[in-house]
Amino acid sequence: MTLIRVTLPYLYASIAIIAVWQAVVTFTSAHVAILPPPALAAQTFIELVISGEIFTHIRASLSRVIAAWGLSALIAVPLGLAMGRWRRFENIVDPVVELFRPISPLAWIPLAILWFGISETGKIFIIFVATFFPILLNTVSGVKGVDKVLIRAGQVLGCEDEWSLFRKVILPASMPTIIVGFRIAFGTGWAAIIAAELVAAQSGLGYLIADGMEILRSDLVMVGMAVIGVLGVLIDSVFRIISKHYDWGT
């Protein structure tokens, strides 16, 4: 029953979107190259599934996002813990972070091509830019939000150095906020996949969309967009389950 209750809103939303989509196609008589009917997009999706091409694109995009997201976590979490714990260190690093944070991942595409060429590194770099700052800022917020009473209790009960205090008190207490940062970062990285795969990609959902645009196959564009949306919801559901069923703060 729980699965049905969670799934039904998305089913209703999908039906409404398809109905509006079909209505727009019918009443505007849009050319199929501009806006394909839902039936054509569904047929294209089935063809891509049967050929296995869609799974190749999904695997390529997921591998890039996971690699960039993991790299962001490895760098942003320790940096955020340090910034949240030591004010002087934060005062030094925070201005640099705030200068780079507003720059869109799209703006990094020319430099990514110049620095890394058309290799996978350039694509991962662009997604890294999109995923780094949500993890960093949520980690800083999590550390600053730890109850001072918990910190004093940890010091009284045997956490004699900063490392043991971090490991036993600060990190567990700030983990719920860090998990939120992971969730937001994966979402922004997944949204940035189209920009990343503009860097001379030969596979991936972003490549599928860009290729469909170039050859005037709007059905490919719609299929790519739909798959990105559905996978985004499924991935976000995983983070929701983790946040709901595990009490990281204890």
Image: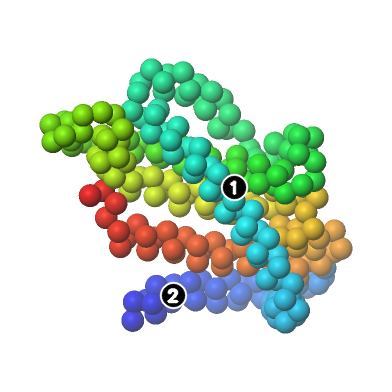
Dot 1 amino acid type: Ala
Q: Residues within 10 Å of mark 2 (few under 14, many from 20)?
A: few
Verify CB contact (< 8 Å) between mark 2 and mark 1: no
Dot 2 amino acid type: Thr
Tell me if residue 24 can be seen: no
- Residue at left 44%, top 75%? 7
Q: Residues within 10 Å of mark 1 (few under 14, many from 20)?
A: many
Q: Position of residue 110 (x, y in %)?
A: 77, 36
Which quadrant of the structure image shows residue 230?
Answer: bottom right
- Residue at left 76%, top 79%? 51
Q: Residue furthest right?
A: 215
Cα gap from disc 2 to disc 1, whole angstroms: 29 Å
Q: Position of residue 67 (x, y in %)?
A: 59, 51
* Numbered mark located on residue 68 in the image: 1
Total residue callouts: 2
Q: Nearer the viewer, residue 50 or 119?
A: 119
Q: Position of residue 194 (x, y in %)?
A: 69, 53
Q: Residue under circle 2?
A: 7
Nearest to the eye among marks 2 and 1: give it: 1
Is residue 200 toward the left or the right of residue 148 in the image?
A: right
Q: Nearer the viewer, residue 66 or 155?
A: 155
| 215 lies above or below 8 | above
| 71 lies above or below 90 | below
Is residue 167 toward the left or the right of residue 131 in the image?
A: left
- Residue at left 44%, top 63%? 238
Is residue 69 toward the left or the right of residue 122 in the image?
A: left
